[in-house]
């Protein structure tokens, strides 16, 4: 079974106890610890041990860094050849230590290799070292003072600068720059459990979001296929540009009309009837709009009342309906050849969900309101109504 590989980077002599306790903690989490002092790294006899440690870092999923009082061994020069220090320096606003990289330790280079490979880094620093780091930051620009300060948390005075500047490099990176002080092992364990749990939750959430976005992308791709179909269907027409433009502009209009029960949608769409006559041909004699004044979060629906008392339930509001009506006025003024090409292309649209916003209900409005579990206040009919062939203006 594949397990996340956790590379533990730290000096060994001063942090041996912490390292020995971190190992069973990582194993109990179900992960695989990679530690140089436990033979988890292949030490190739043909190369330096430092090179073996650096070579193992890209094979891991997470790097766990623990900084203490020791600097550690200075890396062998051959290891430095495998780094792009110019790129590493650009990743932090405090990068002087990386620019002058000759004195970097093997522990620091392990971290830099993780940075190069964009491996998540969880960094912890002894709180005494962290406190002395603040003292260093306050005084480092005054050379006469900084050279006189003895930092009790650092084992060797000459290594203080390299430890503190490495902390600066990590905390001033543009990303993956978290570093936490600790006073005891439980501080590290508690933080890692929380962070890894948060990370797992975030990955699950992003996976759900990615699935939703994938569906949206698929829907968008289908729309592009629709437009492609329009172009291909009208390649023989002279006014290709007008057809493509009209297919986009009048798509909602044609989708709406094709959702209505009519003898011949094509003939109706190619007619020059008024909007009211077009609806009456579909058997619609009245238009009403629902309103939920006590709950503004409910969707506003439009109802198209039929001659027999049944109705269409439209999942859009009056403004959308008025926009479709305005589109019809523009559509009937288009030339016949363009209209015919647009209608033929869009009526052949294979999208099965094209009518999802217009539903024919198999009951009367009174029956629907009586069966509804919610109180729906149907507002007065809109400015057009037609009953038994008589037209009324409101």
Image: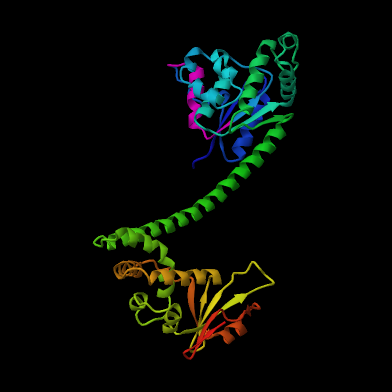
> Can residue 54 be seen?
yes
Q: Residue at x 60, y 83 (%)?
A: 369
Q: Residue at x 64, y 26 (%)?
A: 66
Please give left or right for residue 239 compared with residue 146 in the image: left
Foreground pick, 59 / 376: 376
Task: Tell me if residue 55 is in the magenta stretch.
Answer: yes
Please give left or right for residue 253 compared with residue 237 in the image: right
SS majority, magenta: helix
**Residue projecting furthest to the bottom:** 388
User: What sort of colour scheme is used for the picture?
Assistant: rainbow
Foreground pick, 362 / 287: 287
Q: Position of residue 157 (x, y in %)?
A: 70, 11
Task: Tell me if residue 112 is in the magenta stretch.
Answer: no
Q: Name the image quarter holding residue 249.
A: bottom left
> In this picture, which residue range is highlighted in magenta?
46-63
The vertical placement of 73 against 313, above or below, is: above
Q: Residue at x 49, y 53 (%)?
A: 213
Quadrant the C terminus occupies: bottom right
Q: Residue at x 69, y 72 (%)?
A: 294
Q: Position of residue 29 (x, y in %)?
A: 61, 40
The vertical placement of 69 against 186, above or below, is: above
Q: Position of residue 181 (x, y in %)?
A: 71, 29
Q: Position of residue 250 (x, y in %)?
A: 41, 66
The vertical placement of 353 against 3, above or below, is: below
């Amino acid at each position: 079974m594949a397990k996340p590989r956790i590379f533990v980077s730290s000096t060994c002599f001063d942090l041996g106890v912490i390292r020995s306790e971190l190992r069973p903690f990582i194993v109990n989490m179900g992960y695989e610890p990679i530690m140089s002092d436990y033979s988890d790294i292949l030490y190739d006899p043909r190369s330096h041990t430092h090179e073996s440690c650096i070579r193992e870092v890209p094979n891991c999923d997470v790097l766990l860094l623990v900084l203490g009082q020791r600097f550690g061994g200075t890396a062998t020069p051959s290891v430095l050849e495998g780094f792009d220090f110019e790129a590493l320096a650009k990743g932090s606003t405090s990068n002087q230590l990386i620019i002058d990289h000759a004195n970097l330790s093997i522990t620091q280079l392990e971290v830099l290799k993780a940075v190069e490979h964009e491996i998540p880094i969880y960094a912890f620093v002894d709180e005494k070292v962290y406190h002395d780091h603040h003292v260093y930051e306050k005084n480092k620009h005054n050379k006469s003072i900084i050279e006189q300060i003895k930092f009790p948390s650092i084992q060797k005075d000459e290594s203080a600068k390299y430890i503190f500047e490495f902390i600066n490099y990590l905390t001033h990176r543009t990303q993956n720059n978290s570093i936490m002080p600790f006073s005891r092992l439980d501080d590290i364990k508690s933080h890692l459990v929380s962070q890894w749990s948060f990370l797992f939750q975030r990955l699950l959430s992003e996976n759900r979001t990615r699935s939703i976005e994938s569906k949206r992308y698929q829907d968008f791709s289908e729309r592009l296929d629709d437009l492609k179909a329009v172009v291909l269907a009208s390649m023989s027409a002279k006014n290709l540009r007008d057809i493509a433009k009209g297919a986009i502009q009048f798509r909602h209009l044609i989708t709406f009309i094709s959702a209505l029960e009519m003898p011949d949608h094509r003939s109706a769409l190619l007619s020059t009837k008024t909007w009211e006559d077009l609806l009456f041909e579909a058997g619609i004699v009245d238009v009403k709009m629902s309103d939920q004044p006590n709950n503004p979060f409910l969707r506003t629906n439009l109802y198209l009342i039929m001659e027999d008392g049944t109705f269409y339930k439209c999942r859009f509001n009056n403004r959308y309906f008025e926009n479709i009506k305005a589109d019809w006025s523009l559509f009937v003024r288009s030339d016949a050849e363009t209209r015919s090409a647009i209608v033929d292309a869009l009526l052949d649209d294979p999208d099965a969900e094209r009518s999802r916003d217009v539903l024919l209900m198999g009951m009367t409005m009174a029956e629907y309101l009586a069966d509804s579990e919610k109180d729906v206040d149907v507002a007065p009919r809109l400015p057009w109504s037609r009953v038994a062939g008589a037209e009324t203006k409101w």
